[in-house]
Image (cartoon, rainbow, N blue to C red):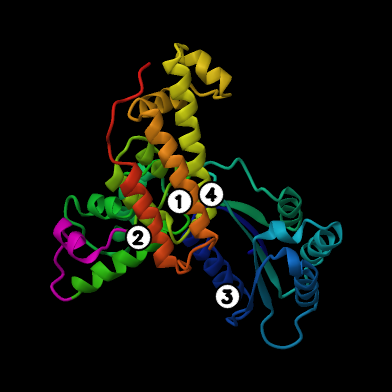
C-alpha cells in the first residue's frame, strides 16, 4: 500500500514534481479515484506559527466526505526554527489522519547531499512508513544522456548530435560547483516539448540545426565562473556570465564577490612581487587549496597593482549606485548597465603584468 508520507530532497525540481504527481495518482487510485486536495505551503519564518497551525488542522482532521488533503511543504527549515512550531509539524506527520497525505520537499543546491537536512522530519516520515527520496539534477557531463533518455521515453527521435547541442544550450559546459541546477531538467523537458511539436507532422528526427534554431541559450549562472572571468580579464565572458546571474543573484552579493576577488588579487600579487613563494603567500592568506592559490596567482599576473586599485575604486562607486547614493539610477536596467560599464572599464587587458 502506498504510504501517505514522503520526504523529497535534492536539487531537481522536475524529479520532485513528478514524484509528487505519482504519489497523488497512487493515493487517488487507492481511494477510489478521487484526487486529494493539494495544499501548498512554503515555509516562512515570519508566519511559521500560522502555517504549522493550518497544516495541523488540515492533516489531523479525518476525511468525512470527498477526498482528503495532500499537503506539500517546501522550505521546511523555516518551520522548524521554533521548538513549538517544529513539534506541531512533527505531530501532524506522526498523527496524520486517514485519507490525508504529506510531502516534505527540501530543495538544496548541494551537488551530493548525504541525506535529508531536516533529520527529525525525515525520521518522522520514516516512522510512519514513508521514505526519503533523493532528487538530483543530472550532472553537466550527464545532461546529454538524460536528454536522450527523456526523448526516447516520449518516442521523440533525436538525430546524432542533437542531445549534445541541447545540453550545451542549457549549460553542460558550465561545471562550477556553485551553479543552481534545480530547473535545468524542467527547462530541458520544455524544450523537448517544443522540438516535438516541430516534428509532429513529418515525424523526422530532431537535428542539431533544429536545436540551434528553436532553443535559446539558458545556461545557469555561476559566481565562481563570473569572478574567474573577471580575474582572467575576459570581459566578454564576464558580461555573459553576469547575464546569467543577474535575475537570480542579489546585486550586493555580486559586488561582494567582486570586491573579495580584487582584494585577493592585490594581496597575492603584492606578496609574490615582494619575493614570497606561492605556498607561503597562500598560507598567509588562509587559502588551503593549492589549486585555488595557483589560479589566483595566475590571474594576478594579468593585472598591474594600479589597475586593481582602480577596479576597487570602481567597485565602491558601483556599490553606491546599487544603494542609490547620490544618483538617479534606480532601475534594474540602469544598474545592470553600471555593472557592464565597470567590466568594460576595468577588465580588458592593459598595462604591464605584476612580476613574481
Residue 225 within the magenta-colored segment of the rendering: no
Q: Name the residue under label 1.
A: 137
Q: Earlier in the sequence, mark 2 or mark 4?
A: 4
Q: Which of marks 2 and 3 is nearer the N terminus?
A: 3
Q: Disc 1, disc 4: CB below 8 Å?
A: no
Q: Which of marks 1 and 4 is nearer the N terminus?
A: 4
Residue 239 in the figure: left or right of residue 61: left
Percent of width and height locating residue 246: 43, 58
Q: Which mark is residue 29?
A: 3
Percent of width and height locating residue 26: 57, 70
| Residue at mark 2 to residue at mark 4: CA–CA distance | 18 Å
Q: Which of marks 3 and 4 is nearer the N terminus?
A: 3
Q: What stretch is highlighted in magenta?
A: 201-217
Vertical relation: 314 (above or below) 61:
above
- The quarter of the image holding the N terminus is bottom right
Secondary structure type for disc 2: helix
Q: Mark 4 points at which residue?
A: 109
Residue 210 within the magenta-colored segment of the rendering: yes
Is 75 or 276 nearer to us in this picture?
A: 276
Is 301 or 163 nearer to us in this picture?
A: 301
Front of the two marks 3 and 4: 4
- Counting labels gives 4
- The quarter of the image holding the C terminus is top left
Q: Earlier in the sequence, mark 1 or mark 2?
A: 1
| Residue at mark 2 to residue at mark 3: CA–CA distance | 30 Å
Q: Name the residue under label 2.
A: 188
Residue at 16%, 59% in the rendered image: 207
| Residue at mark 1 to residue at mark 4: CA–CA distance | 10 Å
Where is residue 149, by image quadrant? bottom left
Percent of width and height locating residue 58: 76, 77
| Residue at mark 3 to residue at mark 4: CA–CA distance | 34 Å
| Residue at mark 1 to residue at mark 2: CA–CA distance | 11 Å
Amino acid at each position: 500500500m502506498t504510504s501517505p508520507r514522503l520526504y523529497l530532497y535534492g536539487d531537481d525540481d522536475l524529479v520532485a514534481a513528478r514524484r509528487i504527481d505519482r504519489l497523488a495518482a497512487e493515493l487517488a487510485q487507492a481511494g477510489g479515484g478521487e484526487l486529494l486536495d493539494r495544499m501548498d505551503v512554503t515555509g516562512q519564518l515570519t508566519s511559521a506559527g500560522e502555517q504549522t497551525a493550518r497544516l495541523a488542522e488540515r492533516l489531523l482532521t479525518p476525511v468525512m466526505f470527498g477526498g482528503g488533503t495532500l499537503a506539500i511543504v517546501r522550505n521546511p527549515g523555516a518551520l522548524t526554527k521554533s521548538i513549538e512550531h517544529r513539534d506541531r509539524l512533527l505531530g501532524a506527520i506522526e498523527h496524520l489522519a486517514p485519507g490525508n497525505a504529506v510531502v516534505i520537499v527540501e530543495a538544496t543546491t548541494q551537488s551530493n547531499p548525504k541525506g535529508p537536512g531536516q533529520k527529525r522530519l525525515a525520521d518522522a516520515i520514516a516512522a510512519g512508513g514513508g521514505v526519503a527520496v533523493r532528487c538530483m539534477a543530472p550532472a553537466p557531463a550527464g545532461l546529454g544522456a538524460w536528454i536522450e533518455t527523456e526523448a526516447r521515453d516520449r518516442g521523440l527521435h533525436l538525430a546524432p548530435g542533437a542531445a549534445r547541442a541541447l545540453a550545451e544550450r542549457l549549460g553542460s559546459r558550465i561545471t562550477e560547483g556553485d551553479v543552481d541546477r534545480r530547473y535545468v531538467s524542467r527547462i530541458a523537458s520544455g524544450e523537448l516539448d517544443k522540438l516535438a511539436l516541430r516534428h509532429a507532422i513529418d515525424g523526422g528526427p530532431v537535428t542539431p540545426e533544429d536545436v540551434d534554431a528553436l532553443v535559446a541559450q539558458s545556461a545557469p549562472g555561476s559566481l565562481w565562473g563570473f569572478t574567474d572571468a573577471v580575474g582572467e580579464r575576459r570581459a566578454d565572458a564576464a558580461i555573459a556570465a553576469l547575464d546569467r546571474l543577474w535575475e537570480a543573484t542579489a546585486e550586493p552579493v555580486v559586488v561582494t564577490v567582486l570586491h573579495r576577488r580584487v582584494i585577493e588579487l592585490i594581496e597575492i600579487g603584492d606578496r609574490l612581487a615582494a619575493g614570497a613563494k606561492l605556498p607561503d603567500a597562500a598560507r598567509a592568506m588562509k587559502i588551503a587549496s593549492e589549486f585555488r592559490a595557483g589560479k589566483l596567482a595566475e590571474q594576478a599576473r594579468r593585472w598591474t597593482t594600479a589597475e586593481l586599485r582602480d577596479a576597487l575604486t570602481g567597485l565602491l562607486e558601483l556599490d553606491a549606485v546599487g544603494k542609490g547614493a547620490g544618483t538617479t539610477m534606480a532601475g534594474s536596467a540602469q544598474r545592470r548597465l553600471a555593472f557592464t560599464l565597470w567590466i568594460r572599464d576595468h577588465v580588458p587587458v592593459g598595462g604591464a603584468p605584476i612580476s613574481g
